Image: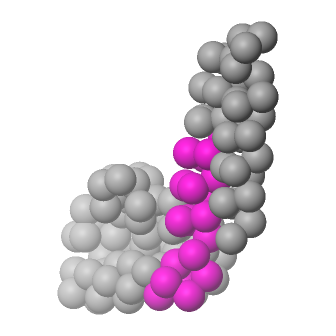
Amino acid sequence: MNSDTKLSLEYDFYGALLTKRQSEVMQLYHEENLSLSEIAEEFGISRQGVHDALKNAQEALTTYEEKLGLVERFMRTNAAVARIDEIIDGMNDEGTCSGLKEIKQIIDSLND
């Protein structure tokens, strides 16, 4: 997963934990694609102030993910569901038992 995708997921999961300013700056920069200068003008602060707010927000999101691991769990769950879907699609009368065993193993691994 590239860093922009990871950051976006972290923001989706933990954005509500950021300060109001950090959240607004993240949204304007990443979702509205405004430049640092445009955001600085909007808030009446320097470009450096915007840069610092972005950096602090990104560091906070990374810290939340390191401690809580919700994005990682979400990604593991999505991969497991995709694999289960593949198994079900490939099941036939002869492979049903082994397919069900693999599905159970996948589900058990999600509970670790």
**Is residue 73 rendered magenta in the image?**
yes
- Let me know if residue 45 appears in the view: no
Residue 51, quarter of the rendered image: bottom left
Along the horizontal axis of the image, is 45 left or right of 107? Answer: left
Residue 3, placed above or below residue 61: above
Dividing the image into 4 quarters, which one contains the C terminus?
bottom right
The residue at 25%/70% (across/down) is 36
Q: Which of 62 and 41 is in front in this view?
A: 62
Q: Position of residue 104 (x, y in %)?
A: 76, 46
Q: Nearer the viewer, residue 70 or 56?
A: 70
Residue 28, placed above or below residue 69: above
The residue at 43%/80% (across/down) is 62
**Is residue 105 rendered magenta in the image?**
no
- Bounds of the magenta span? 63-81
Q: Main secondary structure of the magenta part?
A: helix
- Let me know if residue 47 appears in the view: yes
Q: Which of 40 and 57 is in front in this view?
A: 57
Along the horizontal axis of the image, is 20 left or right of 63? Answer: right
Q: Position of residue 8 (x, y in %)?
A: 46, 59
Residue 54, quarter of the rendered image: bottom left
Q: Where is residue 94 in the image (x, y as percent from the top left)?
A: 73, 14
The residue at 64%/27% (across/down) is 87
Q: Where is residue 3 in the image (x, y as percent from the top left)?
A: 31, 61
* Residue farthest to the top, as pictured: 93
Along the horizontal axis of the image, is 74 left or right of 1? Answer: right
Residue 83, placed above or below residue 49: above
Along the horizontal axis of the image, is 38 left or right of 74? Answer: left
